[in-house]
Image: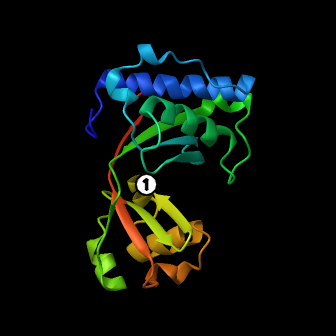
């Protein structure tokens, strides 16, 4: 797959794996058993990914790896489990919610540093709806997937909320020491593959 688009079969495999993970973790507090030999070779390559859970259109959990840290199928398992029970913005998903939860998986390209000399140049270079953004100031960091532009289309507000998500003052996106990395995401949901 090499950072490319997954096939319909690969998307289905990953979504089914995320759904199985959700069920196992929420109902039985365990990861599903996955035989790596049965996983398509392309899904054994390391890749950054996020799993987003929504309930009636509202965010219910979203966790992932910005950078490739483990084989993609394992990243989906860990991210789905963490989104269900470890996203500190939400209470853990309950068994009676599982039928209402919708799953979206975002496969990330490798984040690359964005060069800019001023806050204005940064704003000019951002591409709403296309770029996922990682903001780093010192040891603090946060990211928004490209899909977040749908909720926050204003570039300055997007960066203010991203700084806040990182535990920074909202104006810190203007800090000359702020580092910005961009990536793109291939996102797919259940019933849309």
Instruction: Give the quadrant of residue 176.
Output: bottom left
Secondary structure, mark 1, is loop
Residue holding disc 1: 145
Residue 87 placement (x, y as % from top left): 65, 48
* Residue depicted at 37% across the width and 64% down the height: 181
Q: Work out which quarter of the rendered image holds the C terminus and state it.
A: top left
Q: Which one is in front, 63 or 161?
A: 63
Q: Is residue 153 left or right of residue 130?
A: right
* Residue depicted at 55% across the width and 26% down the height: 19
Q: Is residue 20 above or below residue 79?
A: above
* Residue depicted at 59% across the width and 26% down the height: 21
* Residue depicted at 44% across the width and 83% down the height: 174
Q: Is residue 90 above or below residue 152?
A: above
Instruction: Give the quadrant of residue 112.
Output: bottom left
Q: How many marks?
A: 1
Instruction: Give the quadrant of residue 98.
Output: top right
Q: Which one is in front, 87 or 35?
A: 35
Residue 89 placement (x, y as % from top left): 68, 54
Residue 154 is at least partly visible in this image: no
Q: Which one is in front, 52 or 152?
A: 52
Residue 4 placement (x, y as % from top left): 25, 38
Label 1 environment density (alpha carbons within 10 Å; few <14, some 14–19, many ≥20): many
């Amino acid at each position: 797959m090499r950072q490319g688009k997954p096939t319909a079969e690969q998307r289905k495999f990953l979504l089914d794996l995320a759904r199985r993970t959700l069920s196992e973790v929420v109902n039985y507090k365990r990861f599903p058993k996955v035989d790596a030999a049965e996983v398509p070779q392309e899904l054994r390559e390391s890749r950054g990914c996020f799993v987003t859970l929504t309930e009636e259109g509202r965010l219910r959990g979203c966790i992932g790896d910005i950078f490739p840290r483990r084989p993609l199928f394992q990243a989906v398992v860990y991210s789905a489990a963490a989104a269900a029970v470890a996203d500190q913005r939400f209470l853990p998903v309950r068994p009676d919610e599982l039928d209402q939860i919708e799953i979206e998986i975002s496969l990330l390209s490798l984040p690359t540093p964005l060069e800019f000399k001023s806050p204005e140049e940064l704003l000019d270079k951002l591409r709403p709806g296309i770029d996922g953004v990682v903001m780093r100031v010192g040891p603090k960091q946060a990211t928004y997937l490209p899909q977040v532009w749908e909720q926050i289309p204003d570039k300055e507000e997007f960066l203010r909320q991203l700084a806040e998500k990182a535990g920074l003052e909202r104006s810190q996106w203007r800090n000359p020491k702020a580092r910005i990395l961009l990536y793109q995401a291939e996102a797919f949901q259940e019933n849309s593959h």
